[in-house]
């Protein structure tokens, strides 16, 4: 185990995180709305701790070799996320009003994993600089803090492993240089989407703080808003509807595979036909909107216009796993619950900022199931399978099926754990199920006591820590965290 190389990479990562905290500290110093500077010291302390830890690790670590081994690369991903979240929680622990260490960790993990679940009941009590840090955490975690690392630092020979284990993008490009180019392209797309979204929100009448906070968390499909009412805060603005439409557009763009933008920018239009995952995703969103709109109009007691507006925003927000809300969807007819829950679980496209199981896995599962049906009466027939124009072999199909099965089994086990911990609190079934699925799938709001108008602050500290672990596992798609519990990974050989 090359701990010195791991220390070097993690040290640079924590140093970069301290710079982001320092930016928020500068904002706290300059913000005229916070004359008392309540957010300044917590952010400076957190930045100092992160910088100190980063420098210690850099100087104690070894020189980066031409290649970081696979094992070290996977461990860097997992440890990088865990310790980045711990450092990111410091402002919430020492800032006023203070959160408990478990609640602060939950808030930080929810930010970095772009889950969007919160333990804060009244956001208006917090300094704007710390709320800005919440948004920046989601922006850093949206594309992936280590994908950003790969894009900015090309000297790491382990870029391939960092990139593939930290993001949902499955690249066929084998060389470090090409992985680095892909990460740079994704970063360019991410920056462009953020800038356009921000300028559009500013043009629609939002102040700079709101425009920045919501642009960062929209493109990252994170859902943290500095307002208690989330996007409903803007619903009664003169441009309220236009603001919602603008955010809907960028939630869709953020949850669509970034590969499509790279293909378009390079002029390879013919390759767009292969990206069927995007077509499936748009179709799922469209069907979800139509069903919820119809049910809401016919049985929900709402006008057609009111139902359509609520359905479009909610379905896009849920399908993209952003988690913004404009209406309380728990008041809709029960039939809509199943549509919302299904979209929560599926999520967006691979290679995007969204969470969930990903549409590409759904496509593969449907086709694999169809193959088995055909083989029931034609056992000797050989049937090929393609997804996004790529041939799918038996290994890839088995891996996908095992991933979905493992996700389901771990979700059931996690529900039991949460129910046991919260037994004395009288937690109900819908809250247990949705709390696990909403955190494990990096979605945010659920049903019951964690619905769109509630938060996760009522849970016991042990539950909050456990759900934090689920969020990181869901964001890293299980394996980069599960390897921590395999003794062989830590042995020297």
Image: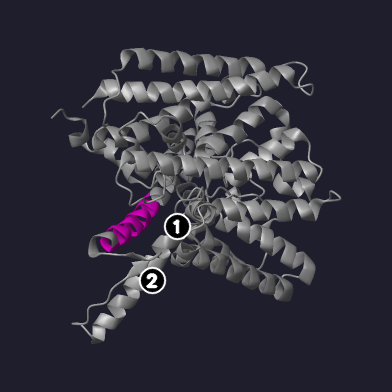
On the question of residue 91 being in view, the answer is: yes
Tell me where residue 38 appears, x and y as whole percent: 69, 18
Q: Which residues are magenta?
A: 397-413
Above or below for 260 versus 459: below
Q: Which mark is residue 422?
A: none
| Whole-number angstrom distance, CA of label 1 to CA of label 2 | 13 Å
| Crowd class of label 1 (few under 14; some 14 to 19; many from 20; radius 10 Å) | many
Quick one: which residue is furthest to the front in this view? 267
Q: How many marks?
A: 2
Vertical position of residue 288 compared to residue 122: above or below: below
Direction left: furthest residue: 493
Name the residue at 47% across, 30% down: 85
Asked if the residue under mark 2 is in contact with the one under mark 1, i.e. CB atoms within 8 Å, the reply is no
Identity of the residue drawn at 72% across and 42% down: 199
> Which of the two discs, 1 and 2, labels the residue nearer the N terminus?
1
> Is residue 14 a member of the stretch shown in magenta?
no
Establish if 392 lies above or below 88. Answer: below
Q: Residue at x 42, y 27 (%)?
A: 83
The numbered disc on residue 358 is 1
| Image quarter in which the N terminus is found | top left
- Provide residue 166's location: percent of width, then percent of height: 39, 41
Residue 174, compared with residue 207, is above or below; it is below
Is residue 309 shown left or right of residue 314? right
């Amino acid at each position: 185990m090359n701990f010195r190389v791991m220390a070097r990479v993690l040290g640079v990562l924590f140093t970069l995180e301290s710079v982001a905290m320092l930016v928020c500290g500068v904002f706290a110093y300059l913000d005229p709305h916070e004359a008392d500077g309540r957010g300044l010291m917590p952010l400076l302390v957190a930045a100092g701790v992160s910088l100190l830890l980063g420098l210690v690790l850099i100087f104690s670590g070894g020189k980066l070799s031409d290649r970081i081994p696979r094992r070290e690369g996977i461990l860097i991903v997992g440890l990088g996320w865990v310790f980045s979240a711990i450092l990111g929680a410091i402002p919430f622990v020492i800032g006023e009003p203070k959160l408990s260490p478990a609640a602060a960790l939950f808030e930080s993990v929810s930010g970095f994993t772009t889950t969007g679940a919160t333990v804060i009941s009244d956001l208006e009590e917090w300094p704007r600089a710390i709320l800005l840090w919440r948004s920046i955490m989601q922006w850093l975690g949206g594309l992936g803090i280590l994908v950003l690392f790969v894009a900015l630092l090309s000297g790491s020979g382990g870029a391939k492993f960092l990139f593939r284990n930290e993001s949902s993008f499955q690249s066929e490009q084998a060389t470090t240089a090409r992985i680095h180019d892909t990460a740079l392209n994704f970063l360019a797309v991410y920056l462009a989407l953020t800038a356009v979204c921000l300028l559009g929100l500013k043009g629609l009448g939002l102040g700079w703080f709101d425009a920045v906070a919501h642009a960062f968390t929209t493109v990252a499909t994170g859902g943290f808003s500095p307002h208690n009412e989330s996007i409903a805060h803007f619903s009664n603005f003169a441009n309220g509807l236009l603001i919602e439409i603008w955010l809907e557009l960028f939630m869709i763009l953020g949850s669509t595979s970034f590969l499509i933008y790279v293909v378009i920018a390079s002029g390879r239009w013919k390759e767009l036909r292969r990206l069927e995952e995007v077509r499936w995703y748009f179709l799922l969103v469209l069907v979800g909107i139509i069903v919820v709109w119809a049910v809401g109009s016919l049985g929900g007691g709402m006008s057609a216009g009111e139902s359509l507006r609520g359905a479009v925003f909610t379905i896009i927000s849920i399908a993209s796993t952003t988690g913004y809300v404009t209406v309380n969807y728990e008041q809709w007819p029960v039939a809509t619950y199943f549509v919302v829950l299904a979209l929560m679980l599926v999520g967006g496209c691979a290679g995007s900022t969204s969470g969930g199981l990903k549409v590409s896995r759904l496509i593969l599962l449907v086709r694999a199931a169809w193959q088995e049906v055909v083989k029931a009466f034609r056992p000797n027939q050989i049937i090929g399978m393609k997804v996004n124009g790529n041939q799918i072999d038996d290994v890839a199909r088995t891996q996908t099926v095992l991933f979905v099965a493992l996700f389901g089994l771990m979700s059931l086990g996690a529900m039991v754990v949460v129910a046991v911990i919260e037994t004395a609190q009288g937690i109900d079934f819908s809250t247990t199920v949705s709390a696990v699925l909403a955190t494990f799938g990096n979605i945010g709001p659920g049903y019951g006591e964690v619905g769109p108008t509630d938060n996760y602050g009522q849970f016991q500290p042990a539950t909050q820590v456990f759900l934090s672990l689920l969020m990181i596992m869901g964001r890293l798609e299980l394996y980069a965290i599960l390897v921590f519990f395999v003794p062989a990974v830590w042995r020297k050989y």
